[in-house]
Amino acid sequence: PVDIPMFTEQNELKGYQLIAKIGEGAFSKVFKGINLTTQEEVAVKVIKKQTLTMTQEDKHTKSTTKLEQVLKEVTLHKMITSLQCPNIVKFIEFKETSSFYYIIQELLTGGEIFNSIVKYTYFSEDLSRHVIKQLGNAVRALHSMGIVHRDIKPENLLFEPIEYIPNDKPRLRKSDDPMTKMDEGLFQPNIGGGGIGIVKLTDFGLSKQIYQTNTKTPCGTVGYTAPEVVKDEKYSMEVDMWGVGCVLYTMLCGFPPFYDDKIDTLTEKISRGEYTFLQPWWDEISVGAKTCVAKLLEVNPEKRYTIEQFMSDPWLNKFDSKIRVKSKIH
Ligand code: ADP
Ligand code: MG
């Protein structure tokens, strides 16, 4: 086809045609692509091999670390895909050329939940529940396998658009809205859009397997592990639950629970769990929703909701009557 732009990332990649850039992360660019044999649409996460210019000294160590990291992401993503959880983005295949790594995955055409929050300002309780339940489902699948995601945020939550009877109309952000400060240039219309149908978790770049499911024994040689590592791993599942809490909070009011221009102040606020249900944004939100958020944003990891406790939360299990699917767009 003549009208398809040519990307540098396309060179050497056989079997797929890159169509458009749809996303970006710290080390990656993500493209919509097409499998030239099956005509299937896919997402291609491209990681440049030499992303960083390094000194001769740390060249060796850094580049192997990067390779190891990509391979770890691929291994875990492949393993996670075998769970066949409907709320996890499917891994398709991994390719490597002289300049790039390519992680080929199932395409989610709605884009990031993050962009929808920016666009809609905030979600109704029903819509928030619809999304967070699906995230819970994904986290349950991961945790049951002894895997922690460690990077749960609205940018890593993707969706398929659907048409539903809208009770979630876009609202204008008020000028004193906490998000307004952070908002400049945030909203980038992604491909697709529309109502939020199926939601899937992606980006296993920071994920880690803590224990093997069949034995529940920790990965690696236990006996030689330092106490702080053991302690770290003990609380790592809880890290994801904190992430779920941050996502839920952000959907309900339109801005994140912790925010500060200065990183030191932000870190302080987080370590003390210093967040509020800020007026007037939280005034109309139910006690049930606030309680659920509070049990997730609990500073003490031992008291924080586990995935099973979260999945049986009363607010989460309230029947939502308002999200009725009209028809699927494709
Ligand atoms: P990074 O590890 O660099 O953060 P991600 O895997 O999170 O990379 O991908 C970066 C962005 O690309 C995502 O936030 C999302 O906007 C987009 N993206 C990633 N995977 C897909 C996919 N399967 N379908 C649609 N968009 C995607
Ligand atoms: Mg990401």
Image (spheres, rainbow, N blue to C red):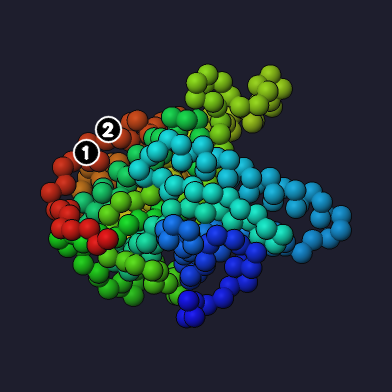
Q: Position of residue 166 (x, y in %)?
A: 17, 63
Say which amino acid is labelled 2.
Ser
Q: Check disc 2: other Cα within 10 Å, few if <14, some if 14-19, many if 20+.
A: few
| Residue identifier under label 1 | 317
Q: Is mark 1 within 8 Å of ligand 1?
A: no
Q: Which residue is mark 2?
A: 312
Residue 167 in the image, given as x and y percentages of width and height: 16, 61
Rate crowding at label 1 as few (under 14), some (14 to 19) or many (20 or more) other CA atoms within 10 Å: few
Q: CA distance from mark 2 to mark 1?
A: 7 Å
Which quarter shows the C terminus? bottom left
In the visual, does 33 lie left or right of 68? left
Query: Does label 2 or label 1 sit earlier along the sequence?
Result: 2
Callout 1: SS: loop
Residue 191 rendering spot, x and y as whole percentages: 38, 69
Residue at horizontal 35%, vertical 62%?
110
Q: Are marks 2 and 1 in contact (CB under 8 Å)?
A: yes
Give 329 or 70, whichever is nearer the viewer: 329
Left or right, 42 with respect to 175, comes to right
Q: Amino acid at mark 1?
A: Asn
Looking at the image, can residue 231 be seen?
yes
